[in-house]
Amino acid sequence: MNAAFQAALNAALSGAPAFQAALTALINASQNFAASFTAALPGLAAQLNAALSGAFGATLPALSAAFNATLNAVLSGSLPAFQASLAGLNAAFQAALNAALSGAPAFQAALTALINASQNFAASFTAALPGLAAQLSGSFSASLAGLNAALNGAFSGGFNGLSAALSAMFTGGLSGLSGAVNAAFSGLNAALSAGLSVELAAELSAALSASLSSGLSGLVQTGGALVTSLGAGLTGLVQTGEALAGGLGAGLASVAQTGNSLARIWLNASAQIIAAIEGATGASFGVGLAGLGQTGEALVASVEGAVAELSETGVAFLTAVNVAGVEIAADVRDILINLQLALEAALRASIGFNAAA
């Protein structure tokens, strides 16, 4: 189940590197464009300033000299010289204007290249966006659908099998344990009844008859000692039976508490597992895992059914053990009563026989 979940998660995130690479290329292209444009602007401005400064710096002295010559010719009253200076002034002005505008084509070419590069970049980016969006949408849709199916299959199969296995294991194991305990207690009851009722009574009767046949005086003393020892023995047997019944009751109570604690632990653990799985998958995948809620509900239902069956089996087991303990206590009490009656009968028979003799 862990391997299937890892494979589905890797399939869901397989489109992330392509998206990251495209985004990185876009960021790098934008940075390169900004850097090239920023680097070109100072050079272009410096080139334009140099061209204008060179053109006007080279032609202004000549223009000033021609203007001064024209003024001198006018002031001197020489009209031909004034016309010649005007022609020279016109030529110098044309030359200065041509020199000033000689840097314009370079600036225009650079600006045209910049505009073309910007248009090409915008066109390529616009053309790449729909394909990138379609690729990302397709990859995420396919991977989320596969992940949903894989998770549903894994959780449904794994938890259903786990629920059935747990239910079968606890039901079969506790049923077999209950049968074994009942059989063991029944065998112990039969063995105690047979051994204490017949053999012990016969042995005590033979021993009392042999010991009391020696004399009436010794019989009285032996009877007193025997009654005392029997009373102490019976008291010890009663106390032992009470302690056994108390220990058995405490053990049954501990078993009941352990079964209840186990059931509560299973319920709490199941609820926490379901809550953790639902929270993690809901926060990570959202709409893509809508079928996981139904799988969680089926899991909760199966776990609750298994726990209910476990509780019923535990109650049946505790009931059987309780009944067996009550039967054992009753059998021990009957055995002790029969033993006391047998001892009293043997004692009376021995005393009557010796008195008659």
Image: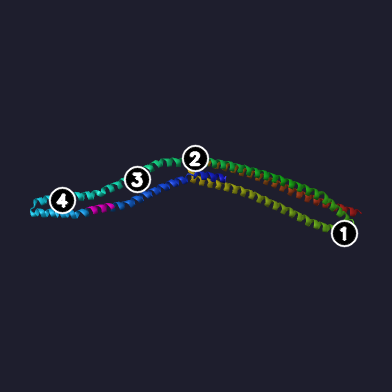
Q: How far apart are marks 2 and 3 (CA)?
A: 37 Å
Residue furthest right in the image: 357
Q: Do the residues labelled 2 and 4 touch (CB within 8 Å)?
A: no
Q: Do the residues labelled 1 and 2 touch (CB within 8 Å)?
A: no
Q: Please, what secondary structure does the residue beneath circle 3 have?
A: helix
Residue 88 is marked as 4
Of the numbered discs 2 and 3, the one sitting upstream in the chain is 3
Residue to which mark 1 is pinned = 218
Q: Give the range drawn in magenta.
A: 47-55
Q: Alpha-carbon neighbours of circle 3 within 10 Å: few (<14), some, or many (≥20)?
A: few
Q: Please, what secondary structure does the residue beneath circle 2 have?
A: helix
Q: Which colour scheme is used?
A: rainbow
Of the numbered discs 1 and 2, the one sitting upstream in the chain is 2
Residue 117 is marked as 3
Q: Are marks 1 and 4 in contact (CB under 8 Å)?
A: no
Q: Which of 214 and 260 is in front in this view?
A: 260
